[in-house]
Image: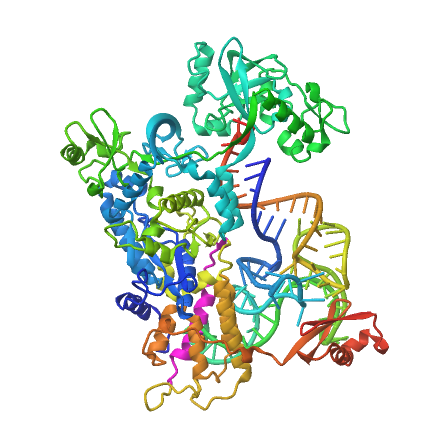
RNA sequence: GGCCGAGUGGUGAAAUUGGCAUACACGCAACACUUAAAAUGUUGUGGGCGCAAGCUCGUGCGGGUUCAAGUCCCGCCUCGGCCACCA
């Protein structure tokens, strides 16, 4: 037992804990209150075939430390595990190999489970769920039906993002810089009948709810940006020689006299029927343009529509242009162009030689020039005056803004308006490996809900995975026959499946009642555990998951199932673990660290401690192959101190706390060491609660550095206990086989801090002369200021700087510092 | 372009929120043990000057507040993340 070789006992304990059911069946725990419960949650993991990554180990270990710590101080901890198991990678793999996703997914889950158990995560495995199980997706479908009943799930024809490679529609969120998030192919636009969830119903509450949650500021800001609330005005422009009006949305209605033309999006209803050939051509080219071409090549393009509008205030005719820098989906899909104050309009006007009217002037200048509205006027409206604006000339923009709005309102051509960037959530996917949308169509093509007694609406297995542009479900014989049998001749199923974000946006509710076959979760269970007390999830791809989860939570609350407004009370993000070269790990860069290799060489305790020691949990941190050694050495020293010594026991076989650990001799009254231990117990506990795991480990190391031969057995047990959340295997091994522990170290209580041992009677404080440290003295904490000063003046170094005890001023911060000004 | 972060030794990072800058590690150097290496242990390790006690400079840059600034205020520079033709 002298050599530290962790692998045997680590594997033994990881299996033993699960076999003993040490952390299980927490979801039906009794006597749970808002005060004593801790619902700890790690982001729903997608079980990829490549297995656990070192980037998973960091948040998992952090949560596991919290779980073990909170259990030790008497909290009811709920720490469940599940799998976001539907999704494209498994299906793509099936297309390549023919192996059904259900098989590869099961294998991947097995691998992940084994690896997570191997690093000792104290999950409640009894509550394990997976979104691809019929017992789970039955309730995903049930949720769809509840939304459908409330008209919050609806079908409409819409231009959608289409990935030609994945052969599927993508949500806006899955399009990254014009490319498919999954396969990097250029995304094109296509018009299709799709199912949507009406998340826009909750827009304002999705904004205001952010005030009540403890989330990183940046995350809240990202949510706000995505929702994109913008206050402005809608102004109607009459088309010449026509009854038709074009409404435009603007946030700068006060520049309206500078509107020298209008621009509409290529998809705008006004122009789709145009007979002009150059318009037709432009529409065609705009449509075929990929998102990427649009973004990379920001050169303005456009075409004159042949139509004119009447400016409501000047009553002059202005031309209407078509250009793809105006987005159909935002605002009204049409703008009034003010080239004198808007960068984009200015570029467009220059390129197509359109007139520019300057309507703003800096109040100390007489120049007529371009002034950016968003950058300058909006910031300091009082510094700019209106010009070329009829009756409003000479007013500053603060007054002008009000007065012009009033005029537009009086004329009934403009009104205040709010627009949002957030649009309804497109959930249809023309893919196999997802939850089927529970809708059937009668022979006339009308949609009907699948009856609840037919849930789970099973995903058929007789399919070919090769994508054809339509859902693979269409070719399932069983699926089509099932519908005719259940609903009648000529009835057909909805062939699309749901976006996997639907599955993963309510899983935290299912966790509270994971085996329920009658309900998606009992209200009292959700009431018991919700909201999640602490959620740890990566900073990438969270905007949508969080918006969707919040949307479902608010919907289910309105339906009476749930009593919380927000699902996640506190949230933090783990940083990224970078490669040793300080770059993001990737196979192509060859800088990937495999956790299995680290475990084989050093053991899981070392891996856990190293990842916790690397730095602050939310910072990106580079891996260092050498630095792992530091944690390994520390654990070896703990091992040789505790593990290899024979511990004397008293006659009853229980441990004699008055025995010295290393020598077996009577305990020396080592006051300093006991004091340090108490300080360490307090610091480790405080640091864990503050998520400062790196400094908690540093404190543990500092204590060990001070340990000599005189650590009492009682103190040894306390030290081992506060180390146990970080290194659960080795501490368990020593506890059970060397210290005679009958029960697991992970079920005993956190040591009490002896507050009296923390109170220092004497302290050493630095003495400064003019702010520079020149010496130090030992004092009693409650010595009066005068006494401290007198003592300081006796120090020889101090006397070198202060002659005849004369100084201008002395500042004494009790127990901390003394500063003389000379 | 918008919104968030971050800049401290050779490296990862600490600093009780205004009170001894560089804790804890890694690395490096010397020594001990060894035939030797590994492992382990001991000591040292921000720059400059000095044999030394010590002095002095020092937290991206420039200013300011304060007895006291890595920390607060003003103005810059650099790097990273997310979003982005959103009217």
Of A353 and A816, nearer the camera is: A816
Residue A712, position as x, y percentages in the image: 46, 84
Residue A623, position as x, y percentages in the image: 46, 56
Q: In which image quadrant can residue A559 be found?
A: top left
Furthest residue toward front: A410
- Is residue A229 left or right of A664 when viewed as pictured? right
Q: Is residue A626 visible?
A: no
Vertical position of residue A563 compared to residue A160: above or below: below
Taking the spot 74% from the left edge, 68% from the top edge, the residue there is A772
Residue A808, position as x, y percentages in the image: 83, 70
| Quadrant of image for the N terminus of chain A | bottom left
Residue A150, position as x, y percentages in the image: 34, 37
Q: Does the stretch in magenta take in A200?
A: no
Taking the spot 61% from the left edge, 20% from the top edge, the residue there is A259
Taking the spot 61% from the left edge, 12% from the top edge, the residue there is A316
Q: Is residue A235 visible?
A: yes
| Quadrant of image for the C terminus of chain A | bottom right
Vertical position of residue A254 compared to residue A472: above or below: above
Vertical position of residue A377 compared to residue A604: above or below: above
Vertical position of residue A95 compared to residue B38: above or below: above
- Is residue A51 left or right of A714 when viewed as pictured? left
Of A457 and B80, nearer the camera is: A457
Question: Total of numbered circles in the picture?
Answer: 0
Of A25 and B64, nearer the camera is: A25
The boundaries of the magenta stretch are: A620-647
């Amino acid at each position: 037992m002298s050599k530290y070789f962790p692998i045997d006992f680590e594997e033994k304990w990881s299996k033993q804990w699960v076999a003993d059911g040490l952390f299980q069946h927490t979801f039906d725990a009794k006597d749970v209150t808002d005060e004593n419960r801790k619902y700890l949650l790690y982001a729903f993991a997608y079980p990829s075939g490549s297995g656990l990554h070192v980037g998973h180990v960091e948040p998992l270990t952090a949560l596991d430390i919290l779980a073990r710590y909170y259990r030790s101080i008497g909290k009811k901890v709920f720490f469940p595990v599940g799998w976001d198991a539907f999704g494209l990678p498994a299906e793509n793999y099936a297309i390549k190999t023919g192996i059904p996703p259900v098989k590869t997914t099961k294998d991947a889950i097995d691998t992940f489970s084994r690896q997570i158990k191997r690093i000792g995560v104290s999950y409640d495995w009894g509550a394990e769920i997976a979104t691809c199980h019929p017992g789970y997706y039955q309730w995903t479908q049930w949720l769809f039906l509840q939304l459908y009943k409330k008209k919050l799930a609806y079908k409409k024809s819409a231009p959608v993002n289409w990935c030609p490679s994945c052969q599927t529609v993508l949500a806006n969120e899955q399009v990254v810089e014009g490319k498919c998030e999954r396969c990097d192919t250029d995304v094109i636009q296509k018009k299709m009948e799709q199912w949507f969830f009406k998340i826009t119903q909750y827009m304002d509450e999705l904004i205001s709810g952010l005030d009540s949650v403890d989330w990183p500021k940046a995350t809240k800001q990202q949510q706000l940006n995505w929702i994109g609330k913008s206050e402005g005005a809608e102004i109607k422009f009459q088309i010449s020689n026509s009854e038709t009006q074009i409404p435009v949305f603007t946030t700068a209605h006060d520049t309206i006299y500078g509107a020298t033309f209008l621009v509409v999006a290529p998809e705008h209803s006004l122009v789709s029927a145009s007979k002009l050939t150059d318009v037709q051509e432009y529409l065609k080219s705009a449509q075929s343009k990929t998102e990427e071409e649009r973004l990379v090549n920001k050169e303005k393009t456009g075409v004159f529509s042949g139509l004119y509008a009447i400016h409501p205030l000047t009553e002059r005719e202005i031309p209407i242009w078509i250009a793809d820098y105006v987005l159909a989906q935002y605002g009204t899909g049409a703008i009034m162009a003010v080239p004198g104050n808007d960068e984009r309009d200015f570029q467009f006007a220059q390129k197509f030689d359109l007139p520019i009217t300057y309507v703003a002037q800096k109040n100390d200048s007489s120049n007529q020039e371009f002034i950016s509205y968003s950058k300058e006027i909006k910031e300091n409206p009082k510094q700019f005056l209106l010009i070329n604006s009829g009756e409003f000339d000479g007013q500053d923009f603060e007054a002008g803004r009000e007065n012009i709005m009033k005029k537009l309102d009086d004329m009934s051509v403009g009104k205040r308006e709010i627009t949002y960037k957030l649009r309804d959530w497109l959930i249809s996917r023309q893919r196999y490996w997802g939850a089927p949308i529970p809708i059937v169509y009668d022979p006339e093509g009308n949609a009907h809900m699948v009856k609840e007694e037919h849930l789970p609406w099973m995903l058929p297995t007789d399919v070919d995975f090769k994508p054809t542009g339509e859902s693979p479900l269409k070719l399932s014989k069983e699926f089509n026959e099932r519908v005719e049998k259940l609903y009648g001749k000529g009835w057909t199923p909805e062939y699309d499946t749901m976006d996997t974000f639907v599955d993963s946006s309510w899983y935290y509710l299912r966790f509270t009642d994971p085996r329920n076959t009658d309900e998606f979760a009992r209200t009292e269970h959700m009431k018991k555990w919700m909201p999640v007390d602490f959620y740890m999830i990566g900073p990438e791809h969270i905007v949508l998951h969080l918006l969707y989860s919040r949307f479902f939570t608010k919907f289910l609350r309105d339906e009476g199932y749930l009593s919380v407004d927000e699902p996640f009370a506190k949230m933090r993000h783990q940083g990224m673990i970078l490669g040793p070269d300080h770059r993001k790990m990737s196979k192509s860069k060859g800088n990937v660290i495999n956790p299995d290799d680290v475990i084989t060489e050093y053991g899981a305790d070392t891996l856990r401690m190293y990842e916790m020691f690397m730095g602050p949990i939310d910072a990106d941190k580079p891996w260092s192959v050498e630095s792992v050694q530091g944690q390994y050495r520390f654990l070896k020293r703990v091992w040789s101190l505790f593990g290899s010594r024979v511990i004397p026991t008293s006659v009853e076989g229980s441990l004699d706390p008055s025995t010295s650990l290393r020598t077996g001799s009577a305990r020396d009254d080592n006051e300093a060491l006991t004091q340090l231990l108490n300080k360490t117990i307090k610091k480790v506990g405080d640091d864990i609660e503050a998520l400062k795991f790196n400094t908690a480990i540093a404190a543990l190391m500092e204590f060990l550095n001070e340990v000599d031969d005189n650590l009492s057995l009682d103190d040894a047990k306390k030290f081992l206990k506060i180390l146990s959340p970080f290194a659960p295997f080795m501490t368990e091994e020593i506890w059970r086989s060397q210290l005679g522990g009958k029960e697991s170290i992970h079920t005993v209580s956190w040591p009490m801090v002896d507050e009296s041992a923390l109170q220092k009677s004497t302290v050493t404080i630095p003495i400064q002369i003019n702010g520079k440290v020149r010496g130090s003295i030992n004092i009693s904490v409650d010595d009066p200021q005068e006494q401290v000063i007198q003592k300081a003046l006796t120090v020889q170094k101090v006397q070198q700087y202060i002659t005849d005890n004369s100084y201008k001023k002395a500042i004494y911060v009790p127990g901390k510092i003394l500063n003389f000004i000379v």
